[in-house]
Amino acid sequence: MYCPESFAETSPEILRALIQRYPLATLVSMSGNGLEANHIPLYLAPGEGPQRKNQLALEYAPEPPFQAGRPEDAPKDIVKVVRRHTETLRAERERMIAVSVWRAFGWARVFGVDAIWMSTT
């Protein structure tokens, strides 16, 4: 997202103070309908743990100030928590896929004019 230098702030202390003082942000963007304004609630999690977990889960590793976007850069305890969480999610997703595939039976009926490509003759 473009941010003019005159509006840029990189100091973590100042950013924390701004979020605490103004916890509701407004994001203004241009769309096909003109300007759109969206209100975004901000939450400042205490400590650095939640931020590092999010960086690692998203594999978000740009230049500083982020230092936990890759497993080799993140603290070992953060890596352990994220791996345990993603393993739980993966197991649940695989279980859901197995159930949905198990329930997929019967004949398909294709509607519409583009159904000709389904023909076996």
Image: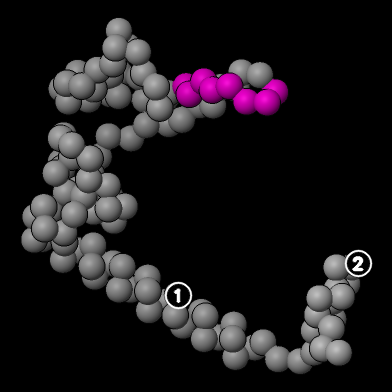
Which disc, if any, is residue 38? none
For residue 50, say whether it is visible: no
Total tally of numbered discs in the picture:
2
Farthest right residue in view:
113
- How far apart, in angstroms, are the residues tagged by discs 2 and 1? 35 Å
In the image, is residue 32 part of the stretch drawn in magenta?
yes
Quarter of the image for residue 109 reads bottom right
Report the span colored magenta: 26-33
Instruction: Between label 2 and label 1, give the one nearer the viewer.
Output: 2
Residue 7 percent coordinates (x, y): 32, 11
Q: Secondary structure at mark 1?
A: helix
> Measured from the top left, where is residue 59 in percent x and y?
27, 53
Q: Which residue is mark 2?
A: 113
Q: Where is the C terminus found, in terms of image quarters?
A: bottom right
Left or right position of 101 against 85: right
Residue under numbered circle 1: 93
Q: Is residue 58 magenta?
A: no
Residue at the image point whose x is 89% and y is 68% from the top: 112
| Amino acid at dot 1 | Arg
Residue 56, percent from left and from top: 23, 54
